[in-house]
Image (cartoon, rainbow, N blue to C red):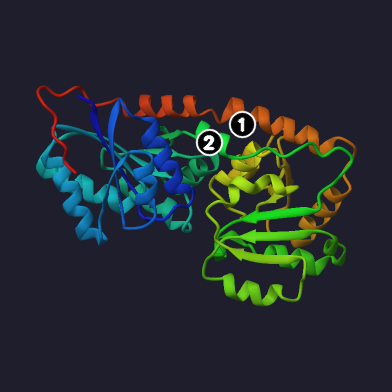
Amino acid sequence: MTAPLLYVLYLGNLYGTERMALATASGLSPRFAPLILSPPGPVSRLARERQLEWAPFDGYLGLVRRLDAALASCDEIALLATRFEQSLIFCALNLFRRRKAVHYVVVHGGGGKNVYWRNRLLAPLPVRFIAVSEFVREELVANGVAGERIEVIENFLTRERREAIAPRGAFGPNGVRKVVVLARTVRDKRVGLVLDAVEAQPALSALTFDIYGDGEELESLRRRGRAHANVRFLGFDPQVATRLAAYDLLLHTAPREPFGLVVLEAMAAGVPCLVPDAGGPASIVSGGAGFTYRASDARDLADRLLRLAEPPPGELDRVVANAARVLRERFSEEAALERYRRALQAPAQARGQSRKFW
């Protein structure tokens, strides 16, 4: 019998957290029998495409019912939660059910400092943590989570995802002309930094900036962007990653991004990345696999963009080659999934017939 595995999401969308959760759950089959729990949303469609079981919940009461049904129907279980509250609910229910459980909180970050700080309240409970980057681990430790309870398992691109992304051709003597930004237009992502840079340096009018993503700041950014013909806010497009090869540079603007899955997607497309010198993306492009600028500094960003528009011969192609190596060696799907398997230490095989609890 395969061991039941619950992966609980806090949103039903298809942002990086949800896509990584489904990729991880799919890769952990058939050793585990995964069930994705999330609020209703497009994640259900991708779960079906991956032949994963999915069940919705609505609010905390709905989650209580789903988790209790799971615990009632098995002797042993593995849980990957993505929020502090989910872990509290599971632990409270298991005080009564008394099931053997392997229990991790997967910390993707995002949502501000409280995402890290609240996890220290889980200290008295049998909960460990998976951080998706060293940056996330450092934030957890800085906010009171014991380092020995944290394992870093970085995000990855599946082979399927890599194959869906067409590669860009070589740069040769050409520099950057077309820049793409893939980010939600919310405050933490600092997408407005693009406009700050364009306004600080008129010479950037020679570059075009296509910005994909939606969020609460989209309309205000669009209004401000109308003054700049070379900047377009194109809203959310779920397929844009497959068209990255049409661009010369991926620009990342969030100064405290926990990881940055779009950076891996750009690497797979042979597109160099320019990211802040802080947060998870800076670690991804270290060692010559990309470029950095001072986080939240519009003038330094403008200077770096102008330099990349007229780079030294071969520089962009060298960075793309380094990024391809890093993607292959450091962000291997197989290695990441094996680390998840070891971390979860699959519950022992139960006797008799299994029955589905979802």
Disc 2 and disc 1 in contact, CB within 8 angstroms: yes
The earlier-in-sequence mark between 2 and 1 is 2
- The residue that mark 1 highlights is 327
Near-viewer residue (245 or 107): 245
Label 1: how many residues lie within 10 Å, few (<14), some (14-19) or many (20+)?
Answer: many
Task: Say the numbered circle drawn on residue 337.
Answer: none
Q: Is residue 260 visible?
A: no
- The image position of residue 281, as x and y in percent, is 62, 44
x 19%, y 50%: residue: 66
User: Mark 2 belongs to which amino acid?
Assistant: Leu
- The image position of residue 79, as x and y in percent, is 28, 39
User: Could you say whether the residue bearing mark 2 is in a helix, strand or loop?
Assistant: loop
x 23%, y 29%: residue: 3
Question: In the drawing, does residue 324 fall left or right of residue 311?
Answer: left
Quarter of the view holding residue 350: top left
Task: Say the numbered circle drawn on residue 157.
Answer: 2
x 40%, y 31%: residue: 27
**Mark 2 and mark 1: span between their CA atoms?**
8 Å
User: Mark 1 belongs to which amino acid?
Assistant: Leu
The C terminus appears in which quarter of the rendering?
A: top left
Near-viewer residue (337 or 358): 358
x 36%, y 26%: residue: 341
